[in-house]
Image: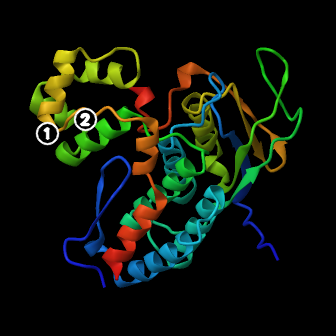
Amino acid sequence: MVTKNAAYRTLTGRSVDLAKLSADERTCLASVVEKYRTHPEWTRFAAWWMKELAKHGVERTSALFRICDDLEARLGIAQGKASPPDYRHYLLALIEERYGSRYQFCKETGVDQGQLSRILAGRADFSLESLAKVLRLLHASLVVQTEAALREAADPDEARRLLEAATR
Amino acid sequence: MVAAIPEARVETWFVIPLVRNSDRRPHDVALWGLLREEVYEVAGGVSGPRRVIALIEDVEPLPGSWRDLATGKPVEDESRKYTVIVAREKLDELRAIMERAANSFDQDEVLFVVQGVDQSVKRDPSKGFLKDDPSGG
């Protein structure tokens, strides 16, 4: 059973509504969580979950893909095979969650699309003033964290516990 | 037993080293998901749960197996190897993904093999980046 309003949050803060998973998807998720409990090696888990989802006939558009992708990412970070996402991915996730697209965000807020694009590409930087404006529009705050804290936030076991609790 | 691949589809594989070429740091974890999304889109369509990525495996560092294009020195990098089954008419699209992946993953060259033939792609900044990679602007 999935508890009402249960949501899974990815590394970059995207929300995945677990209540929308079908019965088949929930069965598959239980199997993924079971596998995850064994602390699999990053690449082996990547290969495994894709096979498992195919075996269960899970569509690529399913939220389960996003969850598995996130679980895999957490393993990659924990095992030192990948770096945590940089701030641009958090920013894009927030923009897409709140506005649906970068285009819509820029249209509704007056932020210059070209400038945002140059910043994301690393060809320009935010002035403190424009950064403050963007954060205000997104109801977000800038937090300075150590890399160790970032890695801790990506803890695979924490994600597994959340999924176990939500699907119990 | 390995299932036969229908003639209209071909087996390809490519290798992505786990570290960036310029600073030897591991890649931003999000790039691996973006790569998978693009490969699925080209090789699998949007709806099918078909096994388009037949295999993902680690490739251990092999001394001298890679050569730095700038220095000519051998490079030993742990890598990920993807085996992908793709329709023949989609090969150019898959190759285009490799070209963008070379930029996103900061690689001078991506080893790309189609039915046993080396079709590796070299870095070309004009080819752009993987979709949704912020580096593409």
- Give left or right: position of B121 versus A152: right
Residue bearing mark 1? A139
Q: Relative to the observer, which residue lies in front, B57 or B121?
A: B57
Q: Chain of mark 1?
A: A
Residue at x 56%, y 37% (from the top left corner)? B27
How packed is label 1: few (under 14 Cα within 10 Å), some, or many (20 or more)?
few
Q: Relative to the observer, which residue lies in front, B23 or A116?
A: B23
Q: Hey, which quadrant is residue B117 in on the image?
A: top right
Residue B17: in sight, yes or no?
yes
Residue B42: in sight, yes or no?
no
Percent coordinates x, y for residue A40 in the rendering: 62, 65
Q: Secondary structure at mark 2?
A: helix
Percent coordinates x, y for residue A27 in the rendering: 43, 83
Q: Hey, which quadrant is residue B22 in on the image?
A: top right
- Tell me how the rendering is colored: rainbow
Q: Relative to the observer, which residue lies in front, A74 or A123?
A: A74
Residue at x 24%, y 79% (from the top left corner)? A3
Name the amino acid, label 1.
His
Q: Hey, which quadrant is residue B57 in on the image?
A: bottom right
Between tags 2 and 1, which lies in front? 1
Percent coordinates x, y for residue B78 in the rendering: 74, 42
Q: Is residue B46 above or below residue A151?
A: below
Give the mark nearest the N terminus, 2 or 1.
2
Residue at x 22%, y 45% (from the top left corner)? A100
Q: How many marks?
A: 2
- Give left or right: position of A38 versus A63: right
Q: Quadrant of the C terminus of chain B?
A: top left
Q: Are marks 2 and 1 on the same chain?
A: yes
Residue bearing mark 2? A102
- Give left or right: position of A140 versus B15: left
Residue at x 36%, y 33% (from the top left corner)? A87
Name the amino acid, label 2.
Arg
